[in-house]
Each structure stands twice: as C-alpha cells, then as structure tokens.
Amino acid sequence: MLAGTFPVMTFVALPSARHAQVVALTGVDALVLDCEHGHVGDDAMHNAVAAAAALGVSPVVRVRGPAHDLVKRALDAGAHALMVPQVGSPDEARQVVASAKFPPQGRRGQGSAFPGIAHGLSVPEYVASANQTLLTMIQIETREGLENVDAICAVPGVDLVFIGPNDLALALLGYVPARGDEPVFVAAIDKIVAAARKHGKWVGRLVNNGALAKEARGRFDTVALTGDTKAIHNWYSAELEVARS
C-alpha cells in the first residue's frame, strides 16, 4: 500500500458494504473502517473489507483497542492493515505485533479462509506471506504515547505510527481541534516524526482537506483525508447554502 507512492486513506464510520463501495470508487487508496468511533460492527466490518478489497482498495481496520481478540477478528475478516488507537507503551505495541503475526514472530491463530480471499490468495499462500505483507499501524495520540514514542517506534513489527491530531490536541491542550500552530502541538508532531524516521518507520496523520494532504506530502508517508460522515455533512451544507442563497 505504501511502496513508492503517497497513498491517501479515508475513514469510514457508516456500516454498509454498498457505502464502502461508493467511497472506494472515489479513487482513495485505502478505507479505514472505524470500529473504534464509527458505527461499524463485526458483520459490517466483514462486508466492507470484502467490498473494498474486491475493488482493489486496501481495507484497513481500526480496532477498538489492543486486545488480542479484536486484532484477531479484524485480520480474520481480511484486513490489509491494522490500526490500533491510543497505544501508550512499547509493551502494548509488542502485544499488538504478537497478535498480528503468525508464529514464530507472534501468536496469531489460523482458521479463516476470508483473509486469503481478501488478498486473492489461497490459505497456504496467505499464511506464508501475511507476516511480511500486513501493515501494523500504531496510533500516537496520548501523553503517554508521546512520552514513549521513541520506544514504541523501536518495536520490531510496528510498521507505521499514525498521529491522531484531535486526541493528541485534547491530551496536550485540553481542546479540539488544534489550530495547528500551538508550540506544544507542533513540538509533539515533530517528536513523533523524528522517532519514526530514527527507527525506519512510516508515519501518517489525519488531515481535513486536500490542500493539507498535499502539504503533508514529503514529510509524511500517508494521510487519512477526513472521513465519510464529515465529507457528507460538509458537501450538503455547502451545496444547500448555495441553493438557498
């Protein structure tokens, strides 16, 4: 998903395979199916993963937390990548990696045909390649995560650190959204990017529009361009203002 390009993702919070297809056909590179804050349950996750993968768009699943069973369900649905929120320590990061990797690198179990289908592979082919191809994304968005970001980035098997700017602003500033120029917020972003580069990890963040996505190119390896609920709301609000003016 990240090789030689600047992939653009977007968050999907609404639970529908048809909705996932509509968003996938916009040209995004990946859908982040939001099982943390979105209205995406287990069935909807499975259906949306399959719908996105069938259209050549990478399904990323943001789970509710680092628990082994949550990671297992996301990967058994066929997720191409895993995003785990609010990781605060290297021990938590190691736990996530262990849950995401088959032995001997981890403790992931095998029993589902769905991941291979989502990758266009047989079960043996998928099992043989998954440890090398699955992206494990760790979100840095708390004071603890920021303090430990260097140690988190040093964990083998963490592929990408993803900045959650809203929660990070809430933790550091006490309000959201950040303007983006607050010194403590700017310093936090710099620290996260520096830690990722030091340890050879990719780094990404959420942005609210295409101009900010373009601005992020070069410093970041990927961005998530807002999400479906905000995009729908913003489009209708703008067009209704024109219609009623």
Image: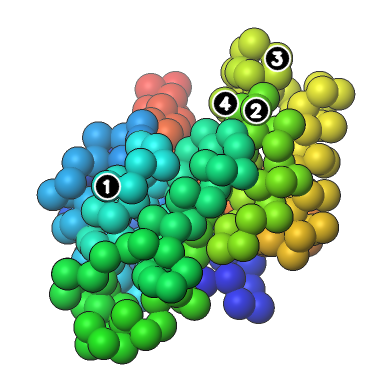
The residue that label 3 is drawn on is 173
Mark 2 lies on a secondary structure that is helix
The residue that label 2 is drawn on is 144
Gap between marks 1 and 2 measured at Cα: 24 Å
Who comes first in sequence, dot 3 or dot 4? Answer: 4
Who comes first in sequence, dot 1 or dot 2? Answer: 1
The quadrant the C terminus occupies is top left
Frontmost residue, 174 versus 6: 174
Who comes first in sequence, dot 4 or dot 2? Answer: 2
Name the mark on residue 167. Answer: 4
What's the residue type where badge 1 is placed? Answer: Asp
Gap between marks 1 and 3 measured at Cα: 33 Å
Q: Residue furthest top?
A: 174
Who comes first in sequence, dot 3 or dot 2? Answer: 2
Residue 103 picture location, percent across and down: 39, 71
Gap between marks 3 and 4 measured at Cα: 10 Å
Q: Is residue 104 above or below residue 137?
A: below
The residue that label 1 is drawn on is 69
